[in-house]
Image: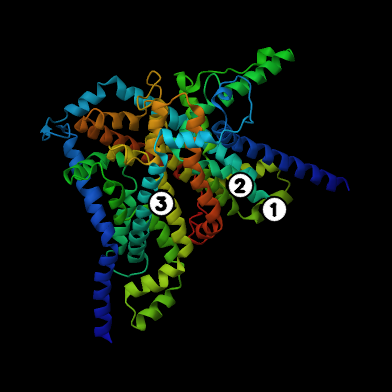
Amino acid sequence: MLRLKRQSIDNEYLTGLLFVGPWILGFLLWVVYPVGSSIYLSLCAYDGMRPPQFIGLQNYRAIFADPEFYVSLKNTFYIILIGVPVSLFFSLSLAMMLNQRRRGISIYRTLIYLPCLTPVVAMSVLWMWLFNPDYGLINVGIRSFNGWLTSLGLGFLSLPAPGWFSDPTWAKPALIIMGLWGVGGTMLIFLAGLQDVPRSLHEAAEIDGAGWWRRQVHITLPMLSPVIFYNGIMGFIGGFQYFTQAYVISGGGGGPEQSTLFYALSLFNNAFPHWRMGYASAQAWILFFITLVLTLIVFRVSARRVYYQGG
Amino acid sequence: MNRRSADAIVSVTGHASLLALSIVFALPFAWLVSTSLKPPAQIFSSSPNWLPSPVCWQNYVEAVNTIPFIRYAWNTIFVALTSTFATLFSCSLVAYGFAVVRWRWSRPLFLVMLATVMLPGQVTMIPVFIIFKNLGWVGSYRPLIIPAFFSTAFFVFLLMQFFRTIPRDLIDVARIDGCSHFDIYWRLVLPLSRPALMVVAFFTFTAAWNDFLGPLIYLNDDRMYTLSIGLQQFVSQHAAEWHLLMAASTIMIVPVILLFLFMQKTFVEGIHLSGLKA
């Protein structure tokens, strides 16, 4: 009996290793080796052809002296500090509206979820057309709305019809608006979280005379805080990876006037069209440290504000 | 009576606001399809018009011929399907190894796997490119497919959550009856996990279908492009031909949405059972 047990534990050990084997191999091939190699390359001049030449911290010094680095950082922070909170607020509001029991609710949920399945390249092309300054649906709509206001003598309320993606001040807001259309995934996670809030809490508060607004602020929001936190962190990490939309809309250049030159786009451009791979590796490590430090800060700050049910 | 009519008003305004919201979300799709069917002359008008007249189905034919979209669609389907099967196989194996097999290193290795999620893809992007370049694989589909054989942390985690809901007794009984772990994995756990596997399949397939960065880095022969690169090239070469661009975008979007609607029921079940919703 004892022998059998020991034998089976030894076997499990080997089977476990065999089952997890693909991941272990992948971890060594696609993580351990590349991380080591990337640290070394960030200290080298390397064009992807000739052997890397060790140059110490020169890449890092060059990055901190490069105005493009600060522009890309500023653009990225714009998305993180404005885009992420706006989209969290919007998707939470949507989830609250969709968290009711009524006929046909699943059709509404599906309709509002669907846009987030649109491939990012196709979504960007579609919104380039919607935001077309002259003939796009949005500006055409704004102009006829303005015409209607003027006919009522309310012309002073007219909305601006800017150049959106072709105007440096409006390119990032346009990207954020486009992002709001594809907010379905975040909305779905909020919706699931809302459905986990015990009804009894709301009912008890209602009996005690708490109105709708007070119940949302004092019950829903605290109960939902882990989900808000999770979505916030994901949005924040996603902000640093912001790439495809900007690449498609600006044709890779980050224009107009570098207004859509995000960090990930600048890094990609250095690595591939320009073959400055040592420099781009150093950019990647700076990105890593910025994300790490900010994530730790976010965890610290929110530790006291996040409530874990039964935790 | 008063109360009831108040309820009715609330209900009607509730429906009205949900309906308005859904319409706002559906408008871009409507504009997409409407533009894709308009004759070129009708596109550049400064008042909103929704109904194409005449309806130009030939826009689709023209879009598909201007850029070899059928070929790109096949390329994309090939990459997406192979990487989906590779991901299903590798992730379910690894998830079984972490969730079902009991061995000493399971926990620490699992924590290492979770930690790798925090590593931005940009850090490993360049060395991984150099590996594939040295293997002579740049310009082939291999860099887009081979990594799928080594599993993805997120899907491993999702499948583990699901495998843990399978009663342990079932597995122990099978063990005592002399089944090997591979038998249990193949004949018991996989068939029981169909909904979760479908969720993983759907996510992997659409991720590969939508992927832009991978093909942008690794594909350089325009006959091998996937839809996302093809569409991006289309934009840079035919910037003002919106009717064709919208037709091409529709071709890329519709399969994903149909796939979702088709799988929706399994999908909801899978998300529910795997505890993903938390």
The amino acid marked with disc number 1 is Glu
Label 3 to label 1, Cα distance in Å? 41 Å
> Is residue B93 visible to the viewer in this orientation of the structure?
yes
Which label was assigned to residue B204?
3
Of mark 1 and mark 2, the one earlier in the sequence is: 2
Which label was assigned to residue A35?
none
A137 on left or right of A251: right
**Front residue of B43 and A116:** B43
Occupied quadrant, residue B108: bottom left
Identify the residue position indicated by label 2 in the image: A109
Label 1 to label 2, Cα distance in Å? 25 Å
Residue at position x 39%, y 55% in the image: B155
Mark 1 surroundings within 10 Å by alpha-carbon count, few (fewer than 14), some (14 through 19), many (20 or more): few
- The chain letter for the residue carrying disc 2 is A
Identify the residue position indicated by label 1 in the image: A203
Residue A43 pos. (x, y %): 16, 33
Q: Marks 3 and 1: which is nearer the front?
A: 3
A67 on left or right of A111: left
Judged from the image, the secondary structure of the residue bearing numbered disc 2 is helix
